[in-house]
Amino acid sequence: MGLQRYQIHEDSFHVPVPREEVWNHYLTADPNLAWNGKIINFALMLSKSDGKIMYRHDQYSGAKVGQVFYLNLSILGLLHIGVAHQIIGIDHDSYFFELSYVEGSESRGKQRISFHATSIKSTKIVHTTHYRSDSSFRDRYVYPYFHDKAIHEYHENMERSLIKGTSSSLGSA
């Protein structure tokens, strides 16, 4: 995908947990918990590889290429927009996965979430988004604001569930 004509949004997050543990958590976390907040909520997931549908509160078997996540984006609690992302790549050696917007979405592009060890006990997560639509106003002013809020909510949920899981497993050891 030639990304020269796409807008770029990038943010990073730091987690005081080893990279391998963070990586495994992101690949196995329940979408109901990961995408659960004021801005964005999980609706359902379609798995192209095994032809299954995962509804809210169904057991999640882990991230696989071809899974399509349908999410509900709430704009100021007044407007609800359906958003869909498909996992298009998982690179276990380089510690990243990629998502694309599904065909027919308002936005086109992809997102890469990569994991970098900053020490033995700490991880930097970099969330890079390449996007564009048919509206330059939307791309410059509307999308970045709501996208930033949505990805912060997602990563905060992931960190909270990861730290909770880490502390509970440390407490039981």
Image (cartoon, rainbow, N blue to C red):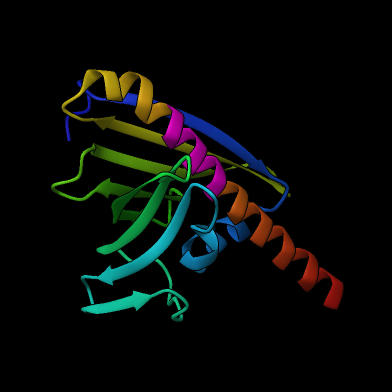
Q: Residue at x 17, y 36 (%)?
A: 1
Q: Provide residue 120's location: percent of width, then percent of height.
A: 71, 48
Residue 107, quarter of picture: top left
Instruction: State the residue in front, 19 or 78.
Output: 78
Q: Residue at x 44, y 76 (%)?
A: 60
Q: Residue at x 66, y 60 (%)?
A: 162
**151 over 142 or under it: above or below:** below
Asked whether residue 156 is drawn in magenta, I would say no
How many marks the image carries: the answer is 0
Q: Provide residue 95's location: percent of width, then percent of height.
A: 46, 50
Q: Provide residue 67's location: percent of width, then percent of height.
A: 29, 65
Q: Provide residue 48's location: percent of width, then percent of height.
A: 21, 70
The answer to whether 52 appears left or right of 122 in the picture is left
Which quarter of the rendered picture does the C terminus lie within?
bottom right
- Is residue 162 something one can see in this rendering? yes
Residue 12, quarter of picture: top right
Q: Residue at x 37, y 76 (%)?
A: 55
The answer to whether 87 appears left or right of 23 in the picture is left
**31 over 54 or under it: above or below:** above
**159 over 28 or under it: above or below:** above
- Is residue 173 something one can see in this rendering? no
Residue 61, quarter of picture: bottom left
Instruction: State the residue in front, 1 or 53.
Output: 53
The answer to whether 45 appears left or right of 152 in the picture is left
Q: State whether the magenta stretch is mostly helix, strand or loop.
A: helix
Asked whether residue 146 is drawn in magenta, I would say yes
Instruction: State the residue in front, 75 or 139.
Output: 75
Which region is colored magenta? 145-154
The answer to whether 51 appears left or right of 18 in the picture is left
